[in-house]
Image: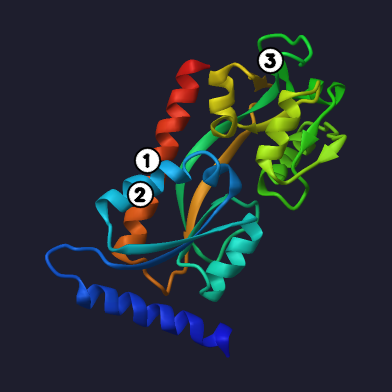
Amino acid sequence: MYRLFLPIMRDLAHARQQLVQRDEVVTGHVSIGLIASVTESVLADSLSRFHARYPHVEVTVSDGYSATFIDWVSGGQLDAALINKPRARLSLDSQPLLDEEMVLVTSAVHGPDLPHAIELAQLPELELVLPTKRHGLRGVLDTAAQHEDVLLAPRFEIDVLSTIVKLVESTRFATILPRIVVERAVRLGTLRAYPILAPRIVRHIVRISHPRRPLSAAAEALIAIIADELRLVSSESTMEA
């Protein structure tokens, strides 16, 4: 019963938000799901900007897998989610937010000597630590590798991106992650990022929402700020590269 009635309750809550808004004051509650690469790179700055502009809105953020968020948005547990675009066709509304290159990452101190750029076919020669196959980023990597008939056999599989970064910083292991995840560590000089060529690996971040449950003004505003922060960090990383 909870699963059945939750979408209806959210619809009523959104309608109530529209009725109680006066003088362009945005109120209400937003429940959103964000993949780890977004939460770890831009969430804090995004929430700070959002609260300064919309201090009367409450926000709940869930961290998890893209596949889980698809189920939660479909079932009404979340207003919207930012996910890695899946290969399968979605029954939800999907809006592209950011296309981002993934890069090979090694320790600036302990990492192996590598050329300025590396080909995808050379990756199996490295000791890799990657997300598990449940992770949306691993799906992007495996799709690219299969297309080029390359077998990725990581020594470690870890879904916590911050742990992957710390492990790579202190060892000879390498990983493949979006630039926004490692941008700060590259700036600090603890990590090196190498472009991957032939072919480039690009992940697509999309916003998903339910077609029968329009987003509230507060949800639209929060997603717009997060998208802006993502583009800002991504552009800074590209210029430095």
Res 138 label: none
The residue identified by callout 1 is 228
Mark 1 → mark 2, Cα distance in angstroms: 6 Å
Under circle 1, the secondary element is: helix
Under circle 2, the secondary element is: helix
Query: Is 25 displayed left or right of 92 in the figure?
Result: left
Contact, CB < 8 Å: mark 1 with mark 2? yes
Binning the other alpha carbons within 10 Å of mark 2 as few (below 14), some (14 to 19) or many (20 upward) gives: some
The residue identified by callout 3 is 108
Which amino acid does the dot numbered 1 rest on? Answer: Asp
Image position, residue 155 (x, y; %): 88, 34
Asked which quadrant contains residue 165, the reply is top right
Binning the other alpha carbons within 10 Å of mark 1 as few (below 14), some (14 to 19) or many (20 upward) gives: some
Foreground of the two, 200 or 57: 57
Q: Residue at x 32, y 55 (%)?
A: 221
Which amino acid does the dot numbered 2 rest on? Answer: Ala
Mark 1 → mark 3, Cα distance in angstroms: 30 Å
Whether residue 153 can be seen here: no
Q: Residue at x 79, y 38 (%)?
A: 146
Counting residues from the start of the chain, the first of labels 1 and 3 encountered is 3
Q: Is residue 217 above or below residue 148?
A: below
Which amino acid does the dot numbered 3 rest on? Answer: Ala
Mark 3 → mark 2, Cα distance in angstroms: 35 Å
The residue identified by callout 2 is 224
Foreground of the two, 204 or 33: 33
Under circle 3, the secondary element is: loop
